[in-house]
Image (cartoon, rainbow, N blue to C red):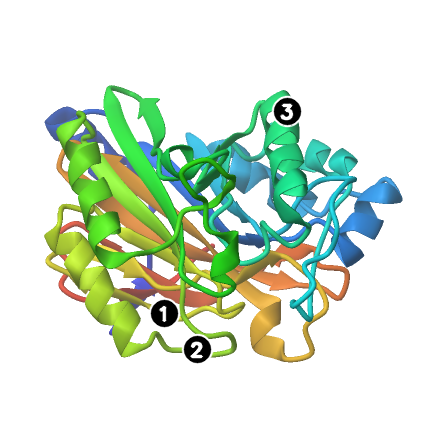
Amino acid sequence: MKIGHFWRSTATAALICLSSSLAHGEPVTLLFAGDLMLADGPGRVIAAGGDPLVPFAGILAAADYRIGNLEVPVATGGQPHPTKIVTFRAEPATLAVLKGRFDAVSLANNHSGDYGHDALLETMAHLDAAGIARFGGGRDLAEAHRPLWIERKGLKIAILGYNEFKPRAFEAGPDWPGVAWSEDDRVIADIRAANAAGADHVIPFLHWGWEKETQPSERQRSFARRLIDAGAAAVVGGHPHVTQGAEIYKGRPLNYSRGNFVFDGFDYPEAQRGWLLRLTLDRNGVNTWETLAAQIDDDGTPWPTPGAATPCGRAGDTEPATCLIP
């Protein structure tokens, strides 16, 4: 592993960015957060007038586009799923803390259906009313698999969301709501379809892996490589509630899990540390990427941890570096 500061000096950073802009156009900065769960502790913080995203407000504001995984239905209706041990449901008022901070959220996870179809439909209606885009779930199968299209600075980027963690009963069908399920061939077909539809870059956003496992499984590693081979510019993952490291394959980053971001209720320290993943993309693909560490308190609020050593890299690297982010 290479170790060093991601930007070694302000002057060096300026020269790198200027060179990249001249050669490939101004880069687009995407920020991917870990799991956002707005019930329980975070819900109580918000109800009391607090805001769990304040510590990261400046970092979120600096990105061109911000994406998170909404690990909770946001609704007043529905009934808890009868076979699930843990179910979540957040009050609609909690979305106020996401508005203006996150541009889009994925619904492709194993909690979107915790309170049934009606609550999922209500969640989508509240997101639409708040002006927060959604992907990875929908009113039917076609909508659930529809890409999130991001158009910034002359680039057209497609984000595709999938869940592969039980219960599969949450999967969308031809005429009923749910999430996009991660069937290998369908995911690959969706990547190719998005490229054919004019995407400059496609990034699959996957809910996968096993909880508490700090290393990706062989299934995750092999499937991530297949997705790059199919044309993905990067692979971004989550679900295990812990970070799972990063790799580079054919020059493209694989970030297996960013862990939690706004979440409480965990009794092991690894679940109280998460990452924000920041990518910059130009015409050629991912230009730079870095992970920004967060320490999550008992109420589920994330706090920046300057000086933490986390994976990062840039175009041309063959393996991740370990960087100290200021």
Estimate the spatial distance between the alpha carbons at disc 1 and disc 2, rounded to whole Å: 8 Å
Which numbered disc, 2 or 3, marks the residue closer to the eye? 3
Against 292, residue 63 (above or below) is above
- The location of residue 196, given as percent across then percent down, is 13, 30
Give the crowd class for mark 2: few <14, some 14-19, many >=20 residues within 10 Å: some
Q: Which residue is mark 1?
A: 245
Against 306, residue 141 (above or below) is above
Is 71 left, or right, of 297 in this rendering?
A: left
| SS category of the residue bearing label 2 | loop
- The location of residue 91, given as percent across then percent down, is 78, 41
Is label 1 in contact with label 2 (beta carbons under 8 Å)?
yes
What is the number of the mark on residue 130?
Answer: 3
Q: Residue 253: tell me if it is visible.
A: yes
Q: Quadrant of the N terminus?
A: bottom left
Which residue is depicted at the point 29% across and 34% down?
Answer: 158
Given the image, on which type of amino acid does mark 2 rest? Thr
Give the tally of numbered discs. Answer: 3
| SS category of the residue bearing label 3 | helix
Going from N to C along the chain, the mark reached first, 3 or 1, is 3
Which residue is depicted at the point 89% across and 44% down?
Answer: 48
Is 186 left, or right, of 69 in this rendering?
A: left
Q: Residue 305: tell me if it is visible.
A: no
Q: Which residue, as the protein is rendered here, is positioned at the far right? A: 48
Given the image, on which type of amino acid does mark 3 rest? Ala
Q: Which residue is mark 2?
A: 214
Given the image, on which type of amino acid does mark 1 rest? Gly
Which residue is depicted at the point 78% across and 57% down?
Answer: 40
- The location of residue 139, given as percent across then percent down, is 50, 33
> Looking at the image, which is closer to me, 200 or 49?
200
